Image: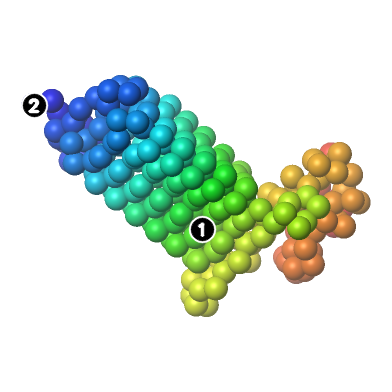
Amino acid sequence: MTTYDFGDGKGPIPAHRHPNGGGWVADTAFVADTAFIGPNAKVYGNAKVYDNAEVFGYAKVHDDARVYGTAQIYGNALVYGNAKVYGNALVYNNALVYGNAKVYDNAQVYGNARVYSTARLYNNAKVYGNTLVSGNAEVYYDNTKKYGKIKVYNNTTESKKMTEQDKIIAWMESAFTAITEAHGNPTSVLELMPAELKKLLISNNIHLVYKGEKDV
């Protein structure tokens, strides 16, 4: 019997190398033959990876997480808990997706971003940097907006709502994207910001600075 230590404190457990890619898969987990598990990637616990999904780099999928469709998990990304990543979604760099979170369609989570609790990220949304998306938040790409800014909604109880800091972080990421798309013109990015973002920035005495120019 072949065993492998996945570094989760449980010691060596029965495992095998996946035939498509060579990554380690615990015998308790399931990976379809059509899925790709790179040589340094790991799938363990009761996790399932199927369809044409790919896990590579040093990424890990574990607990009861599900990855399917043509989703890709790579870099040092982690998907765990009861999280689901599917469709054409990408999770990479040092991103974490966990809890009961769902990332799907063409959504992307990267950088040091975290998507967790019962949050949903879908359509063409991108969450990156140090952004946190939690609670019952929904993040998606709004095609009606000129610059496709990310919107964050939360319908949870007061105790689980995103904090103002969480909202500012999420919106700041999209604001800087807008600055780039506006060719570095701080004046034009102000016209693109949601009114609620402006109020949060002002009430928290936060200023956007681009190349030494203060725009708020």
Residue 11 x/y as whole percent: 16, 36
Q: CA distance from mark 2 to mark 1?
A: 40 Å
Q: How many marks?
A: 2
> Going 46% across and 32% down the picture, which residue do you hit?
74
What residue would you read off at disc 2? 1
What residue would you read off at disc 1? 120
Residue 39 x/y as whole percent: 34, 22
Quadrant showing the C terminus = bottom right
* Residue 213 shown left or right of residue 141 in the figure: right
Residue 18 x/y as whole percent: 27, 26
Question: How busy is the neighbourhood of tag 2: few (under 14 within 10 Å), some, or many (20 plus)?
Answer: few
Q: Amino acid at mark 2?
A: Met
> Going 52% across and 35% down the picture, which residue do you hit?
93
* Residue 166 shown left or right of residue 59 in the figure: right
Residue 76 vertical position relative to residue 89 in the rendered view, above or below: above
Q: Amino acid at mark 1?
A: Arg
> Going 41% across and 34% down the picture, which residue do you hit?
52
Residue 209 x/y as whole percent: 81, 47
> 68 or 83, which is in the foreground?
68
> Going 56% across and 39% down the picture, which residue do you hit?
111
Q: Earlier along the polypeptide chain: callout 2 or callout 1? A: 2
> 111 or 106, which is in the foreground?
106
Quadrant showing the N terminus = top left
Could you tell me which secondary element the residue under label 2 belongs to?
Answer: loop
* Residue 130 shown left or right of residue 174 in the figure: left
> 67 or 40, which is in the foreground?
67
Specify the quadrant of the image occupied by residue 203: bottom right
Could you tell me which secondary element the residue under label 1 belongs to?
Answer: strand
